[in-house]
Amino acid sequence: MKDLSFHIMDIVENSIRAEAKLIGISLVEDLENDLLTLQIEDDGKGMDSETMRQAANPFFTTKSEKRIGLGLALLAQATREAEGKFEISSRPEAGTRIRATFRRSHPDRKPLGDTYATLETLVAGHRGVDFLYEHRRGTDVTRFDTRKGECL
């Protein structure tokens, strides 16, 4: 995956397969501390502790039609390559939160990519799912909330 917008697409598709009806996507560019944090939270089925422990293993997947699950493993690797941290928290029937923090200026940090096009694709393709999006860059904030009919 060449940029973070592809990771967003992949994780959100996982959330939708887990029957999420509300998905929050947050990008925070902390210029002062040289950090970029991507967080995706959903209200889907969640994972038990064993599934959560295995989720970033490339040879583990819950999809019966596949033998490997590279999405989270590739995001975890991307965070390590940019001196970052990758976290998963989840509970059955309580949703899942994926958080990836990168050193923003690191030369190996993947670019953001076209997050607006990614959001547009997700919203158009998944009627019945609400999306909250927030991108903070220093003091600038962009928000999008399908529950309120806001546009990008």
Image (spheres, helix red, strand yellow):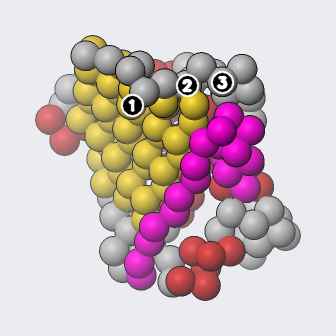
Q: Secondary structure at mark 2?
A: loop
Between residue 82 and residue 10, name the one nearer to us.
Answer: 82
Local packing at callout 3 (Cα closer than 10 Å; few below 14, some 14-19, many 20+) is some
Q: Which residue is mark 3?
A: 106
**Which badge, 1 or 2, is on the more N-terminal residue?**
1
Q: CA distance from mark 3 to mark 1?
A: 16 Å
Q: Which residue is mark 2?
A: 104
* 82 magenta-colored: yes
Any mark on residue 75, and which? none
* 101 magenta-colored: no
Between residue 58 and residue 22, name the one nearer to us.
Answer: 58
Q: Is residue 120 visible?
A: no
- Residue at the location (57% across, 31% down)? 103
Q: Which of the 4 image quadrants contains residue 78?
A: top right
Q: Secondary structure at mark 3?
A: loop
Q: Do labels 2 and 3 touch, CB within 8 Å?
A: yes
Q: Which residue is mark 1?
A: 28
Placement of 81 over or under 10, stated as above or below: above
Q: Position of residue 50 (x, y in %)?
A: 61, 84
Q: Is residue 118 left or right of residue 139?
A: right
Q: CA distance from mark 1 to mark 2?
A: 10 Å
Magenta part of the protein: which range? 73-92
- Residue at the location (65% across, 39% down)? 83
- Residue at the location (25% across, 37% down)? 146
Q: Do labels 3 and 1 touch, CB within 8 Å?
A: no
